[in-house]
């Protein structure tokens, strides 16, 4: 998996359209908040001047549009939903950075570092609110009110799951008895719920066949768990430059999958040492190297890579189960391959 997987064409082709939609939504925001949100999205600097910063991979909006296209829908009609899932994701990132005390995102100071925690909470709340205003624009695209209401319910339930997953993620930081099962439950909520709804919203708005909508939701969820596992591997062993975030998962004592597996499957002196390292306020310097070494020796990296591969295969199996023909499956397969094998 050492190859450098670049963003698939299916992602890059939608990015500009989604960015235009997101700018339209964020530009309707009150000016005081608009600058903060524009900064977080990467199109303004901290003084409010236009710049061309990095604004993420647009994974969720791309999945929404790819799913819509795969079921034969019209992507211009679902653009508000694509913007909405991206805004929900970014609301969670702004709050996540506060909760994790992360100082950098995409090589720039995080929102709370520049504006302080109280205003960053405000900005995250605004981002969440804008997601719902974006979703209501489905009406302007000719989507019937009932479908807009059901779409809102789908997104809201996923958002609630995301909050629960984030709660569990924070709760696990101070526990040594977290099992792989606990971890998978957390990942299914924290990451996979939003990827699942991104795919199912695109399918639902593009084609009402409930069987297809369900298959694409499960595709998104299985893929979301594989994506989170990949993130964990990058967070521990990844190259600092390519990830745009340091290997802070160890220093912040995050219960990433390899760590959970390591704590669960170590014995004797190894277990004691790993617990001792994770009992510290934060893990620094040589201790980080030691954690990596211990986890590798325990087979935690191999385990995580194999489990990620299993979820990836399960995601692809859903595309076939939905009865999509090969040409309609192709962009979703390409997207899945990138998300699970990327190194950034």
Image: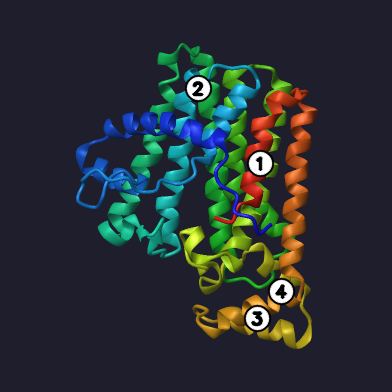
Mark 2 or mark 4, earlier in chain: 2
Cα–Cα gap, marks 1 and 3 = 35 Å
Mark 3 in CB contact with mark 2 (< 8 angstroms): no
The disc at residue 78 is: 2
Please identify the quarter of the rendering in which residue 331 is found. Answer: top right
| Residue in view at x 76 percent, y 55 percent | 307
Q: Position of residue 162 (x, y in %)?
A: 55, 46
Can residue 188 be seen here? no
Cα–Cα gap, marks 2 and 4 = 44 Å
The quarter of the image holding the N terminus is bottom right
Mark 4 or mark 1, earlier in chain: 4
The disc at residue 275 is: 3
Cα–Cα gap, marks 3 and 4 = 16 Å
Can residue 60 be seen here? yes
The disc at residue 336 is: 1
Give the secondary structure at mark 3. helix
Cα–Cα gap, marks 1 and 2 = 21 Å
| Residue in view at x 35 percent, y 58 percent | 108
As rendered, which of 201 and 340 lies closer to the eye? 340
Mark 3 or mark 2, earlier in chain: 2
- Judge depth for marks 1 and 2 and give the one in front: 1
Mark 2 in CB contact with mark 4 (< 8 angstroms): no
Mark 1 or mark 2, earlier in chain: 2
Residue beneath disc 4: 296
Q: Position of residue 120 (x, y in %)?
A: 32, 53
Give the secondary structure at mark 1. helix
Q: Residues within 10 Å of mark 2 (few under 14, many from 20)?
A: many
- Judge depth for marks 3 and 4 and give the one in front: 4
Q: Residues within 10 Å of mark 4 (few under 14, many from 20)?
A: some
């Amino acid at each position: 998996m050492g190859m450098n997987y670049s963003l698939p064409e299916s992602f890059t082709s939608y990015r500009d359209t989604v960015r235009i939609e997101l700018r339209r939504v964020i530009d309707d925001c009150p000016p005081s908040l608009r600058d903060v949100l524009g900064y977080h999205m990467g199109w303004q600097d901290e003084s409010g001047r236009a710049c061309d910063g990095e604004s993420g991979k647009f994974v969720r909006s791309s999945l929404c549009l790819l799913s819509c296209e795969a079921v034969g829908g019209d992507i211009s009609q679902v653009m508000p939903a694509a913007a909405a899932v991206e805004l929900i994701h970014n609301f969670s990132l702004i709050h996540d950075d506060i909760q994790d005390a992360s100082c950098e995102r995409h090589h720039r100071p995080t929102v709370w570092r520049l504006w302080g925690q109280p205003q960053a909470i405000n900005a995250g709340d605004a981002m969440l609110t804008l997601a719902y205003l974006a979703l209501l624009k489905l009406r302007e695209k000719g989507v019937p009110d009932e479908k807009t209401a059901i779409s809102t319910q789908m997104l809201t339930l996923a958002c609630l799951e995301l909050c629960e997953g984030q709660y569990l993620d924070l709760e696990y930081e101070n526990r040594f008895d977290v099992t792989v099962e606990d971890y998978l439950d957390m990942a299914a909520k924290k990451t996979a719920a939003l990827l699942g709804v991104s795919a199912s919203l695109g399918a639902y708005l593009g084609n009402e066949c409930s069987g297809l909508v369900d298959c694409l939701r499960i595709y998104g969820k299985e893929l979301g768990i594989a994506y989170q596992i990949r993130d964990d591997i990058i967070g521990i062993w990844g190259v600092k430059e390519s990830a745009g975030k340091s290997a802070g998962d160890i220093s912040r004592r995050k219960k990433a999958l390899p760590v959970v597996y390591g704590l669960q499957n170590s014995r004797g002196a190894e277990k004691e040492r790993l617990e001792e390292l994770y009992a510290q306020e934060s893990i620094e310097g040589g201790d980080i190297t030691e954690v990596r070494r211990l986890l590798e020796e325990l087979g935690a990296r191999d385990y995580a890579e194999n489990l990620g591969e299993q979820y990836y295969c399960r995601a692809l199996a859903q595309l076939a189960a939905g009865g999509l023909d090969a040409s309609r499956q192709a962009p979703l397969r390409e997207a899945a391959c990138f998300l699970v094998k990327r190194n950034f």
